[in-house]
Image (tube, helix red, strand yellow):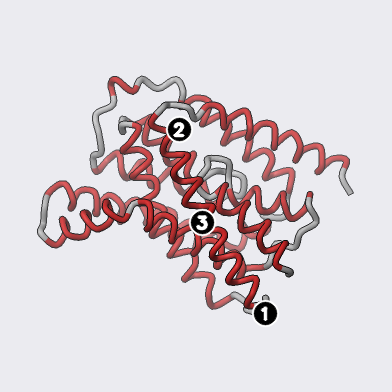
Amino acid sequence: MNPIEASILAIVQGLTEFLPVSSSGHLALAAKLLEVPEGGLAFDIVLHLGTLVAVFAFYWKDITALVIGVFRREKKSLLLGLSLVVGTIPVAIAGIVFGDFIETLRHNIFFISGALVFTGLILFLSGKTDSTKQTGITFKRGILVGLAQTLAILPGVSRSGTTICTGLFVGFSRQEAARFSFLLAIPAILGAAVKELPSASWSIPISAIIIGFVVSAIVGFGALSLLVKFVKQGKLTGFAWYCWTVALAGFAFAIWGN
């Protein structure tokens, strides 16, 4: 893998990890359509850790306040922390049980395209929610968002899109839906990286590792900032049309491509 290929995949990862369009689906499609090698498991871990840094940087104050609040046993922080922990358990179990099967789907362009259609549908329906009746985070709602996150282990299903939209559906405010989604991403991304480390082969050049990590972190921070702005403005439905367009291109490639 050369620096240009590493940069392309890092940009794709940084943009799509947080924008509700599925990073796993786009990485697979980019590798096929642009004829850029995916980089293997080790490079995936590098890219995901880069985007994890972006989450820490963007939500640093919230993370610090949460940790301090938990140590002080503040009720609001304990509720949020427990919701994040319990919300992570379903995706952890799903990843362990279905991990090998999910890995085979990463190379199925037809399946990925269908999953993007599903992602677009969720985003489109989120525009029908009534934000004036949304109340806030509860333990039950946090668990429901965590359960919805398990769908995002499927390539083509957006983690951010699924969790944010589910948060809106169950009653989170727009700001809370975005914040909870990305705080929930921290244990999910970190856990996946730790799980995959023993199986990773680190034969990729050190230059690709550095470029992938730095570029995915920088681009990811920008994408995260942009998405939070869109969520607050209630403008997620535009991403639905994007997902459907990419899905059509994927179907066309799966049927007629070589």
- In the figure, is residue 199 to the left or right of 84? right
Percent across and percent down for residue 175 are: 33, 36
Marks 1/3 in contact by CB < 8 Å: the verdict is no
Q: Is mark 2 on a helix, strand or loop?
A: helix
Percent across and percent down for residue 239 are: 57, 32
Taking depth in this image into account, of 86 and 50 the one nearest to the observer is: 50
Query: In percent of the image, x 74 and y 55: which residue is there?
Result: 31
Numbered label tally: 3
Label of residue 230 in the image: 2
**Residue position for label 3:** 218
What's the CA distance linking mark 2 and mark 3?
Answer: 19 Å
Quarter of the image where one finds residue 164 = top left
Q: Residues within 10 Å of mark 1 (few under 14, many from 20)?
A: few
Q: Is mark 1 on a helix, strand or loop?
A: loop
From where the camera sits, is residue 93 visible?
yes
Quarter of the image where one finds residue 135 = top left
Label of residue 176 in the image: none
Query: In percent of the image, x 55 and y 58: which residue is there?
Result: 216
With respect to residue 114, does 13 lie above or below? below
Q: Earlier in the sequence, mark 2 or mark 3?
A: 3
Q: Which of marks 2 and 1 is nearer the N terminus?
A: 1
Label of residue 203 in the image: 1
Marks 2/1 in contact by CB < 8 Å: the verdict is no
Query: In percent of the image, x 69 and y 53: which residue is there?
Result: 28
What's the CA distance linking mark 1 and mark 3?
Answer: 24 Å
With respect to residue 168, does 79 lie above or below? below
With respect to residue 202, does 250 lie above or below? above
